[in-house]
Image (cartoon, helix red, strand yellow):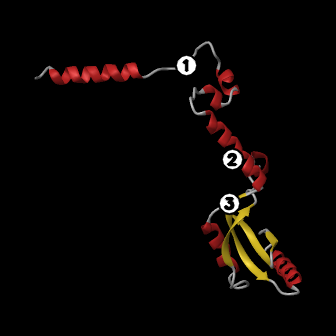
Amino acid sequence: MKLIIPWIAFILFCLSVSAQQSSYNPNQSETENMSQPISQQLPVSQDARIDSLLKRHIAMNKRMNGTDGYRLEVFFGSGLKAREEAMNVKTEFLTKYPDVQAYMIFQSPDFKVRVGDFRTKNEALALKDRIKKTYPNAFIVKDIIQFPKLITDKESK
């Protein structure tokens, strides 16, 4: 009985050591490994239809010209002068909040003014709190937003 536990531990140790395989090749430099994309470095066996679905998804995202997100709608109207009113609201908003993008959209029969490009509802709520005195009827809507501007190392210096 005393010998069973050490033998089981020894067998488990041997199995765990033999299960690990290394793909390190000392003849190949690190720069050669880094020149290939990671997808070519790893052996992957998958259905060929997955690649076609991935390519189709990438193409759909390029055509969409944006990503899913949220905006605040500060105006909508469908009267005779709705376009002029929407332009006035957009201009007024941009003069008060020049750091936030504003968009005028026509969805038949309404002209709408939507502001901001937010990835989450929390970001949209922060702007809604900021503008609630000027635009008390603003509300959050799901929309296709512009891709956020990325900060590069050159811009941060």
Residue 112 higher or lower than 15, as above or below: below
| Residue type, mark 1 in image | Tyr
Q: What is the CA distance from the residue labelled 3 to the residue labelled 2?
A: 14 Å
Determine whether, in the image, residue 111 is placed left or right of residue 130: right
Q: Secondary structure at mark 3?
A: strand
Say which of marks 2 and 1 sits in front. 2
**Mark 2, other Cα within 10 Å: few <14 / some 14–19 / many ≥20:** few
Q: Position of residue 84 (x, y in %)?
A: 89, 82
Q: Earlier in the sequence, mark 2 or mark 1?
A: 1
Residue drawn at point x = 58 percent, y = 16 percent:
25
For residue 2, side relative to residue 11 (left or right): left
> Which residue does the image show at 70% across and 26% down from the upper left?
35
| Residue at the spot of label 1 | 24
Q: Which residue is mark 3?
A: 68
Q: Amino acid at mark 3?
A: Asp
In terms of image quadrants, where is residue 5?
top left
Is 32 rendered above or below residue 53?
above
Vertical order, 124 against 66 (above or below): below
Q: Residue at x 66, y 42 (%)?
A: 54
> Whole-Å distance between the Cαs marked 1 and 3?
41 Å
- Sequence-wise, the earlier of marks 1 and 3 is 1
- Front residue of 77 and 87: 77
